[in-house]
Image (cartoon, rainbow, N blue to C red):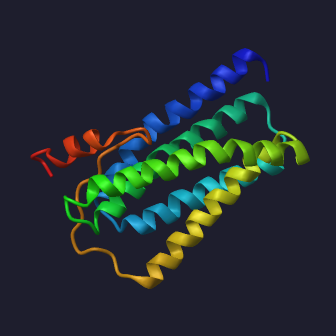
Amino acid sequence: MTIGQIAAFGAALYIGGLVLQYPVGWLSDRMDRRALILWVSALGAVVMLVATLVEMPFAAVLVVALLLGGTINPLYSLLIAHTNDFLSKEEMPSASARLIFLNGFGAIFGPLASGWLMSLIGAPGYFLFLCMLFALLAAYAAWRMSQRSAPVDHAAYSGLTPTASSLAVEAVLSDPRR
């Protein structure tokens, strides 16, 4: 890709996250979050599998980037919301800190693993790595659904970035609309 194409790819990731954050959040407040995690992850896995196997023109790669951003970015907020469904307000900041740690772990080792896979099979290794992660998350969500019932009532979804601090979590928790 050219420098301009790389910039467009990166921008498409964020635009996809921006556009799909609201509909995923809306659905999250109206259905079992585990099922939504499963379906969003499965969608991500299928899109990444297609991107791995099919040679695409750059315009199609941008659509893949939009869908990638539209699945990855809302998933983080969904996972935090689902985690918080089972915690007291006092436990939520600590859990959020642990999730941020896990996100940081992935931010460090994800590029190393995807880079290694790309060195083996080329550029499609990037999409294959993401496909595997999405598939693992979808499988884990399906397994968790078989292990425990959904909470009877869950808190409202709030979009948070992976870099949200414990202070940001506290602000969301103190929102009177919750």
Q: In the figure, is residue 119 to the left or right of 18?
A: right
Can you see residue 166?
Answer: yes
Residue sitting at the far bottom? 147
Between 174 and 37, which is closer to the camera in this rendering? 174
Between 145 and 47, which is closer to the camera in this rendering? 145
- The answer to which image quadrant residue 79 occupies is bottom left
58, above or below 51, in the image: above
Residue 169 rendering spot, x and y as whole percentages: 27, 45
8, above or below 88, in the image: above
Residue sitting at the far left? 176
For the point 59% across and 49% down, which residue is it?
106
Residue 160 rendering spot, x and y as whole percentages: 36, 42
Residue 70 rendering spot, x and y as whole percentages: 51, 42
For the point 47% across and 52% down, which residue is it?
75
Can you see residue 27?
Answer: no
- The answer to which image quadrant residue 11 occupies is top right
Q: In the figure, is residue 44 to the left or right of 4?
A: left
Query: Disc count in the image?
Result: 0
For the point 66% across and 47% down, which residue is it?
109
